[in-house]
Amino acid sequence: MSTNPLRVIIAGGGIGGLCLAQGLHAAGISVAVYERDAAPDARLQGYRLNIEPVGSRALHDCLPAHLWEILVATAGDPGPGMGVFTERLRLLMREDDLPTGLGPSQRTHAVSRITLRRLLLAGLHGIVQFGKEFTGYRQNADGTVTAFFADGTCATGDLLVGADGSRSRVRRQLLPHAKQRNAPGVGIGGKLRLGDTTAWLPEEITSTKNVILPKRDFLFTAVFRRREGSDAIVAGVGDQLRAAGLDPDLVVQDTKDDDYVMWAYVAHRRVLPAEATGQRGQRLRDLVMSRLAGWHPDVRELIAQTPEDTIEQFDFSAAAPVKPWPTTNVTLLGDAIHYMPPVGGLGGNAALHDANALRRALIAVSRGEQPLLPAIAEYERAMLTNGFDAVRAATMYLRLAILRSRAIRAVARMFFRLCGIVPPLRRAVFSD
Ligand SMILES: Cc1cc2nc3c(=O)[nH]c(=O)nc-3n(C[C@H](O)[C@H](O)[C@H](O)COP(=O)(O)OP(=O)(O)OC[C@H]3O[C@@H](n4cnc5c(N)ncnc54)[C@H](O)[C@@H]3O)c2cc1C
């Protein structure tokens, strides 16, 4: 039970909202999460999420120690660094690997979305309510805020956090002028299991993530491998899982999935015929294959052998920059404010970073070190800067993918090659 009068309401129980709830609950701050989905597994998503060091730090700080340990034990390995190649698989640049000897909270983890959600929900029984679609809020004369839900119920607290994703209802009421721009790009992705039949795949593709920068379009590949001895590690946390109220069989089932390479082909929207929009499978694969003339045969084979049922299409949009607004007792985090194309895998990490920053701000408020509104104003300033930096980076990757000027592409390839040859330049451009 909370000993502190601060009451936080979170609309949206996704990655960011649940991470914040865990951090606040651990600090003894009263928090309630209202999630639209009917149940935790209502939408099961297929790809693992790449958690970069910034996201790892947030999860480490917000989760109780035993849940963090389980997360690390059940995560896969996305491999070190990143390569940039031509379509003939000629190396242009390899981004420096992370220094060795880093602890788990400073490293990258490939986490199953379902496992992550289950872990983020562990211990929050009674705090997270499902089937609660947020519809609007009212700011009250006494400084509190009331959130309303589609089932006719409501909840009142001192702060409402909109963590309700890219189509945020909280944002639409708080910042009706904030816009999302449709990016003129389209992504087609699939995944191929690694095994005896894929021994022909080049080592670059099966060991790290890569960007392939041809004369047109763009291909991203990433590999997800179980960590060495993962079965034993997972078996070792069985008791901890049970102690956290989790069914070990359910939590570890994703870690038993085969290792796989995922790829995402990104191109200008004009490449996709109208009748292929929203389709899955063979039609999309044919489309990608038709763009790969002259590419390295192993890359063509990667696409050709990918099972149809894993091939799907993604549309891209990005939040337009938002000017700071007068701070009130309603704030936002993650995709609800700085939605970005998934190119580069930055959005979830940015949401986790926000959650951790807001947790710290609210702990300071609950300890009486700072009043609520100045603490939120400070959080919002830093969140807007970090979040929209990530939107710009993701949009820049996307622009590179859909760029049709051969001259500018040649310059980009030359730039990566130069970074590959001159390590200090590479470090200056690509390190954090
Ligand atoms: C194909 C793909 C691959 C990606 N890969 C990566 C990656 O590797 N790494 C990475 O960092 N990011 C990745 N991302 C981006 C990442 O998934 C998002 O940025 C991240 O989920 C944002 O977290 P969030 O908590 O802000 O929003 P969400 O995770 O979208 O959570 C929002 C929650 O709010 C709920 N909700 C919505 N409306 C309401 C309402 N009215 N009332 C109540 N609840 C509501 C939703 O049901 C949802 O549970 C990827 C995205 C895609 C599409």
Image: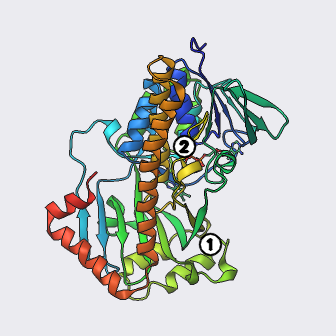
Say which residue appears at 46% left-offset and 65% top-offset. 395
Please say if 260 is above or below 62.
Answer: below
Residue 409 position in % (x across, y down): 34, 81
- For label 1, being within 8 Å of ligand 1 is answered no
Disc marking residue 333: 2
Residue 39 position in % (x across, y down): 71, 39
- For label 2, being within 8 Å of ligand 1 is answered yes
Res 98 visible: yes
Left or right placement of residue 106 versus residue 121 in this view: left
Q: Secondary structure at mark 2?
A: loop
Please say if 221 is above or below 283.
Answer: above
Residue 292 position in % (x across, y down): 44, 84
Disc marking residue 219: none
What's the amino acid at mark 2? Answer: Leu
Say which residue appears at 72% left-offset and 27% top-offset. 141
Say which residue appears at 57% left-offset and 54% top-offset. 46
Please say if 408 is above or below 419.
Answer: below
Q: Which of the two labelled residues, at mark 1 and mark 2, occupies the earlier sequence position? A: 1
179 or 345, which is in the foreground? Answer: 179
69 or 203, which is in the foreground? Answer: 69
Residue 302 position in % (x across, y down): 44, 72
Left or right placement of residue 52 versus residue 327 in this view: left
